[in-house]
Image (cartoon, rainbow, N blue to C red):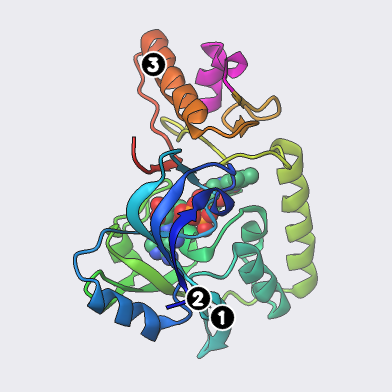
């Protein structure tokens, strides 16, 4: 199959721009092709990725097969007062689609990078909205090639996590429709985008927030700042000056980023007896 690549360089699939090679990389064009592959490769270890805006791939690459859904998984349509969205569509595309169809509450998606599938897995959110608020149902395929369906409640959305098994490849998401006013939707989208551009750095190689906030009132960035880790530089990795929970990569080694993550966890634990949990997913061989 031409959409299978061996020794595939992962750095171009990561917002950090880092990472070694995947032993095998498969980008199915459509659902049939994906199911066929899974049924013929039972037992193979798989990792599905979206845009890699929340992933740090290690320098040594990975032995698992990387699955990245192709173009046919980007379709978005409305049927029976519900939005049907392919998991590989970008959040910004879904936000634009909602605006064009006068559907509100999707404005926040214009501010978060990556795919809709990645957003579901991470229960991504900002400005008091997250995926939990808009999803009706998720469709996916398990490692055996069988289709699965999960209702919002079964997904158990939580802060930047869900209960969806790593063995499931999300293929489609069914979303709620909230009728709104097109002008107000546009106004809100612009407002949120402006707010985001002021509060977060752009044009840097990063994975967004490195750590989850320990709780609602205790922010990871404050702990990073109070330990002085915001000024720490390891190789070519450092925390961004405009948002000290964002790590900025200025080099070619994901080890620098991972070392900075571990250094920060250790410093915060020593000073506050709190263990920071990474929001970023680290993938690959140590
Ligand atoms: C500049 C910047 C700003 C950010 N701002 C925010 C923000 O405001 N709020 C927020 O919540 N996050 C934010 N993030 C983090 C990130 O964009 C989100 O977590 C996003 O939802 C990840 O989507 P993705 O397609 O890039 O997923 P990836 O990074 O590719 O993957 C994330 C996880 O989802 C899994 N996955 C991806 N697709 C599938 C699928 N189809 N089936 C099964 N598993 C899958 C991957 O295995 C991985 O575990 C930001 C990141 C950056 C770089």
Residue under label 1: 75
Query: How busy is the neighbourhood of tag 2: few (under 14 within 10 Å), some, or many (20 plus)?
Result: many
The answer to whether residue 227 is magenta is yes
The answer to whether 17 appears left or right of 59 in the picture is right
Region in magenta? 218-235
Visible residue check, residue 132: no
Q: Earlier in the sequence, mark 2 or mark 3?
A: 2
Q: Is the residue 175 above or below the residue 200 in the image?
A: below
Query: How busy is the neighbourhood of tag 3: few (under 14 within 10 Å), some, or many (20 plus)?
Result: some
* Front in this rendered view, residue 126 or 224: 224
The quarter of the displayed image where residue 40 is located = bottom left
**Residue at 43%, 47% in the rendered image:** 160
The quarter of the displayed image where residue 206 is located = top right
Q: Secondary structure at mark 1?
A: loop
| Residue 234, image x, y percentages | 55, 19
The answer to whether 257 appears left or right of 197 in the picture is left
Label 3 CB less than 8 angstroms from ligand 1: no
Quadrant in which the N terminus is drawn: bottom left
Residue under label 2: 86
Residue under label 3: 266
* Labelled pair 2, 1 in contact (Cβ < 8 Å): yes
**Residue at 37%, 15% in the rendered image:** 269
Q: Residue furthest top?
A: 271
Q: Is the residue 259 above or below the residue 278 in the image?
A: above
* Front in this rendered view, residue 170 or 58: 58
Visible residue check, residue 177: yes
**Residue at 29%, 55% in the rendered image:** 163
Residues at marks 2 and 3, CA–CA distance in whole angstroms: 40 Å
């Amino acid at each position: 199959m031409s959409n299978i690549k061996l020794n595939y360089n992962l750095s171009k699939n990561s917002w950090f721009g880092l990472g070694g090679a995947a032993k095998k990389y498969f980008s199915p064009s459509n659902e049939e092709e994906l199911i066929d592959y899974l049924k013929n490769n039972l037992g193979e270890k798989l990792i599905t990725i979206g845009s890699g805006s929340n992933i740090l791939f290690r320098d040594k690459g990975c032995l698992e097969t990387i699955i990245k859904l192709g173009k046919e998984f980007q379709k978005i349509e409305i049927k029976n007062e519900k939005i049907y969205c392919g998991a590989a569509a970008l959040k910004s595309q879904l936000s634009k689609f909602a605006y064009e169809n006068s559907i509100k509450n999707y404005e926040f998606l214009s501010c978060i990078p990556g795919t809709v599938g990645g957003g579901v897995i991470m229960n991504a959110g900002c400005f008091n909205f997250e995926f939990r608020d808009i999803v009706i149902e998720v469709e996916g395929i398990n490692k055996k090639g069988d289709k699965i369906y999960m209702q919002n409640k079964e997904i158990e959305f939580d802060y930047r996590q869900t209960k969806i098994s790593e063995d499931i490849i999300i293929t489609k998401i069914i979303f709620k429709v909230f009728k709104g006013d097109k002008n107000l939707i546009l106004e809100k989208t612009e407002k949120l985008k402006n707010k985001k551009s002021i509060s977060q750095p752009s044009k840097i190689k990063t994975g967004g927030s490195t750590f989850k906030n320990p709780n609602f009132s205790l922010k990871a960035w404050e702990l990073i700042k109070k330990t002085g880790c915001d000024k720490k530089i390891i190789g070519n990795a450092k925390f961004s000056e405009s948002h000290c929970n964002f790590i900025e990569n200025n080099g070619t080694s994901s080890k620098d980023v991972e070392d900075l993550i571990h250094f920060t966890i250790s410093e915060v634990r020593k000073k506050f007896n709190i263990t920071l949990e990474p929001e970023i997913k680290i993938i690959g061989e140590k």
